[in-house]
């Protein structure tokens, strides 16, 4: 990503300035901005105590290539005509059975596929997304239940894409897709952007209610009194007031929301850079 940014910068430097070739001025409307120095009490919120264990999520796991590579093909069996949210639960049950049948499954690279109850292959485009999700989550200290929910939600999102005629590789290019997802399963969504200190970044979606649930419990004490009624309970306002996730969120709760919603939406967005844990994120806010 850094190389792409450098190339783009060089390209911009070598082209005529916008105002030289198009000397007109436009004013674009934008959302109401909240300045953190006005919204907060005298001091910026310190890092929440729940983040003291976050460094364990950054440890790299040493794996033997020969031991990790397998010919395993885990076929997720679904009923094509079943209600999609129930299919998501079936996916969770199937993956749970694989955890029980293969004790060291999290040490394995696996090919995931979706078939009907007779074993006929379905939804060819899903395999790549499932493998990306599995490879990103399996080496991290997520619980089995967290991984099950993440895989189930990804399949739900992909099936909604197919059911409503959206392309797997670019459903977000159609604005109506988000309305379908909102009405179908996850409620009101908010788009977020997050990145690390190396300049890389990504985007995803998350239910507003879930992200608000992950906010640290004592955040009220850091918001200026005159703005509390407006900011508290307003996730967009909170994200503009505090853009450092370790200072705004409880780590355990944000981790739950991250794996269950942010990672699947991020996978579906098909970003080149993907974050699988909030421990790597140093800034999180609105796009």
Image (cartoon, rainbow, N blue to C red):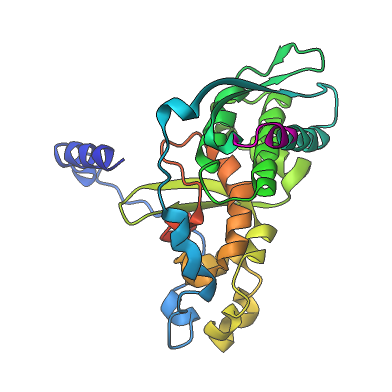
Where 199 falls versus 226 (above or below)? Answer: above
Q: Is residue 158 magenta?
A: no
Measuring from the top left, give residue 96's x and y in whole percent: 73, 38
Q: Position of residue 7 (x, y in %)?
A: 21, 37
Q: Residue at x 41, y 33 (%)?
A: 64
Q: Which residues are magenta?
A: 97-104
Query: 167 or 115, which is in the foreground?
Result: 115
Instruction: Depth check: give the residue in front, 99 or 3.
Output: 99
The spot of residue 267 in percent (x, y) is 54, 37
Displayed quadrant of residue 134:
top right
Left or right, residue 167 beside residue 193 = right
- Residue at 70% in and 52% down: 188
Does 155 appear above or below 208?
above
Q: Quadrant of the N terminus?
A: top left
| Residue drawn at point x = 55 percent, y = 29 percent | 131
Magenta part, dominant SS: helix
The residue sitting at 54% across, 42% down in the picture is 137
Q: Nearer the viewer, residue 35 or 219?
A: 219
Residue 142 in sight: yes
Residue 19 vs 285, above or below: the answer is above
């Amino acid at each position: 990503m850094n190389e792409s940014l450098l190339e783009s910068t060089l390209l911009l430097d070598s082209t005529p300035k916008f105002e030289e070739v198009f000397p007109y001025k436009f004013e674009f409307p934008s959302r109401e901005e909240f300045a953190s120095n006005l919204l907060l009490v005298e001091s910026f919120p310190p890092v929440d105590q729940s983040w003291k264990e976050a460094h364990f999520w950054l440890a790299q796991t040493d794996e033997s290539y020969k031991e990790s590579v397998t010919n395993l093909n885990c076929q997720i069996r679904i009923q094509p005509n079943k209600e999609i949210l129930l299919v998501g639960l079936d996916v969770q049950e199937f993956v749970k059975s694989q955890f029980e049948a293969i004790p060291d499954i999290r040490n394995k690279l696996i090919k995931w596929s979706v078939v009907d109850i007779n074993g006929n292959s379905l939804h060819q485009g899903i395999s790549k997304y499932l493998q990306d999700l599995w490879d990103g989550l399996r080496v991290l200290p997520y619980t089995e239940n967290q991984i099950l929910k993440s895989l189930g939600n990804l399949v739900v999102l992909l099936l909604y894409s197919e059911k409503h005629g959206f392309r797997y590789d670019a459903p977000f290019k159609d604005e109506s897709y988000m309305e379908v997802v909102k009405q179908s399963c996850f409620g009101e969504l908010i788009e977020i952007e997050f990145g690390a200190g190396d300049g890389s970044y990504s985007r995803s979606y998350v239910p507003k209610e879930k992200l608000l649930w992950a906010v640290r419990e004592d955040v009220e004490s850091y918001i200026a009194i005159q703005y509390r009624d407006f900011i508290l309970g307003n996730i967009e306002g909170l994200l503009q007031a505090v853009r450092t996730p370790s200072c705004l969120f409880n780590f355990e709760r944000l981790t739950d929301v991250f794996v269950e919603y942010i990672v699947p939406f991020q996978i579906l967005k098909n970003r080149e850079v993907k974050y699988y844990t909030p421990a790597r994120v140093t800034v999180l806010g609105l796009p």
